[in-house]
Image: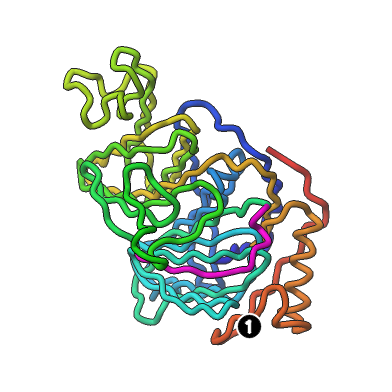
Amino acid sequence: MSNLEREPAELVCPPESGGPPTIDVLQPREVPLGGPRAMPVRRTLPQRGRTTIGAWCFADHYGPDEVAATGGMVVPPHPHTGLQTVSWLFEGEIEHRDSTGSVELVRPGAVNLMTAGRGISHSEVSTPGTTTLHGVQLWVALPDDARDTTPFFEHADTDEVGIDDALVRVFAGALPGVPSRTDAGPEASVTVFSPLVGAQVELPAGGEAWIDLDPAFEHGVLVDRGPVRITIAALDEEIGGEIGSEGGGGADRPDDADPLTETGHSELVERSALAYLPVGHEGVRLTATDAPARVILIGGVPFGEELVMWWNFIGRSHDEVAEYRRTWQAEVIGGDDPDGRFGTVAGYDGSPLPAPELPTVRLKPRG
């Protein structure tokens, strides 16, 4: 998916510390995606005060939207550098085309992952049979040693795994306690370049689940259907560990153990908000209210590199991003070299998307 803002903010994203051992709830901002009948998306990353969660650097949540009213998703060919796009649907169907020659449909239960590397272009269009569109679009920043890799595309189905009352699907990376699909064959998993996780967790009305986490990761919980009560537990010396963690009780903790110590933290998180959890937690408890709940869990080792993000490019400096834009405008929009850095999306009926104008001032780092 493209960032279709006509005046996108140019950001320098410094490496971030884990933050306090509490839950920080990030509220979304609405961004119109497209033309006259713009499909609205709710964006929680990046924003002031939180630009990455692990290597995850962009999160758009959309729908459920009636295609007859919004026109669906029509995103013309546009470029990317230095990132991976992760497309995950709850409802509907989208056709992906890119300049590597890949043509693939994404449907609920399967993931489309595109690695832009040194440069790629792609389009995304909801299919004619789609009446309702509902999903998330996520970006992963590539570390410096992988950001100039040759672009490629992957598509993979996912397995559903039961954890307590929850049904969990891992679509990127690994989640403790959930079997890996890497032994099922080369088409069963997608490529990541830093330690991370992306997963969908569904709960029935009133359901509850303890989800094990990698304590080296920071995490985000994006609520698609909710609200959801999110609980992180504090260290309980009498039980001998973190509540809910291995050796600290978890689902098998003593019957008389308090489910949360006084210094624990719990938040009721509304739909489309994203709850941030700093590093150091071995698990999180998710509890649905009187309605079914669904969340997207993302996480990873804190990203230790400074990023410059503007429009659909990720680089390391203002000059680098400006050169990406110049190349796209000259080679693709101007037609100087359609087979150059970004290539051509074959089979798309329409013109590629011109880049917005760069800001008139150079960016300055900000936290």
Question: Residue 242's image quarter?
Answer: top left
The question of residue 154 being in magenta is answered with: yes
The question of residue 313 being in magenta is answered with: no
The residue drawn where x is 50% and y is 43% is 300
340 is higher (above) or lower (below) than 246: below
On the image, the x and y values in percent for residue 350 come to 59, 85
Quadrant for the N terminus in the image? bottom right
Q: Mark 1: which amino acid?
A: Ser
SS under mark 1:
loop
Position of 348 compared to 178: left or right? right
On the image, the x and y values in percent for residue 268 come to 35, 36
Work out which residue is located at the far left of the displayed protein and give it.
255
Q: Which residues are magenta?
A: 145-157
Q: How many marks?
A: 1
On the image, the x and y values in percent for residue 143 come to 63, 51
Observer-nearest of 30 and 105: 105
129 is higher (above) or lower (below) than 291: below
Work out which residue is located at the far top of the displayed protein and give it.
238
Quadrant for the C terminus in the image? top right
The residue drawn where x is 49% and y is 64% is 113
The residue drawn where x is 75% and y is 59% is 321
- The residue identified by callout 1 is 351
Observer-nearest of 304 and 132: 304
Observer-nearest of 316 and 223: 316
The residue drawn where x is 32% and y is 25% is 243
73 is higher (above) or lower (below) than 12: below
On the image, the x and y values in percent for residue 324 come to 74, 65
218 is higher (above) or lower (below) than 350: above
